């Protein structure tokens, strides 16, 4: 059976420079590649790509209807670092499904959730 190795979200945005600044200066990603119309951001083995929207697809605003969930260590520390630098979706809390997490919005209003198991 074929195996999936990883997934790399590609976020469409018409604000690539501003988005790069947010991911690098606030969230601590490195911009490892930036070319006309797209960029690659990396942190701790996580990769996020940014791209201008495909001209063949209508684009008024980001269309993703879910969120991007990052499993992390030190979720409380991240909350303290970012809570005053980001637009908050929901504050840090413990959930009955065993995660301590919070969520923020990136400059394009994509929801980024950060969670850590309660037992870790």
Image (cartoon, rainbow, N blue to C red):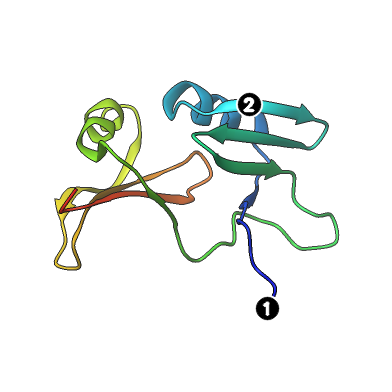
Residue drawn at x 50%, y 38% is 107
SS for tag 1?
loop
Pick the quarter of the image with the N terminus: bottom right
Give left or right: position of 34 versus 104: right
Mark 1 is surrounded, within 10 Å at the Cα level, by few (under 14), some (14 to 19) or many (20 or more) other residues, namely few
**What x and y, as percent, mark residue 68?**
46, 55
Name the mark nearer the viewer: 2 or 1.
1
Nearest to the observer: residue 4 or residue 36? 4
Q: Residue furthest front?
A: 1
SS for tag 2?
strand
- Which label sits on residue 31? 2
Q: CA distance from mark 2 to mark 1?
A: 34 Å
Q: From this view, report whether residue 64 is shown above or below residue 89.
A: below
Give left or right: position of 97 versus 110: left
Q: From this view, report whether residue 88 is shown above or below residue 5.
A: above
Q: Which residue is mark 1?
A: 1
Give left or right: position of 99 versus 86: left
**What x and y, as percent, mark residue 11?**
63, 49
Residue drawn at x 64%, y 65% is 4
């Amino acid at each position: 059976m074929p195996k999936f190795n990883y997934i790399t979200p590609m976020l469409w945005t018409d604000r690539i420079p501003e988005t790069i600044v947010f991911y690098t200066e606030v969230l601590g990603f490195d911009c490892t590649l930036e070319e006309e119309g797209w960029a690659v951001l990396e942190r701790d083995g996580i990769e996020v790509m940014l791209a201008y929207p495909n001209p063949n697809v209508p684009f008024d605003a980001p269309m993703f209807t879910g969120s991007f969930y990052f499993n992390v260590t030190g979720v409380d520390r991240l909350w303290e670092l970012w809570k005053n630098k980001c637009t908050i979706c929901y504050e840090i809390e413990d959930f009955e499904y065993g995660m301590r997490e919070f969520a923020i919005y990136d400059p394009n209003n994509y929801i980024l959730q950060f969670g850590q198991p309660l037992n870790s």
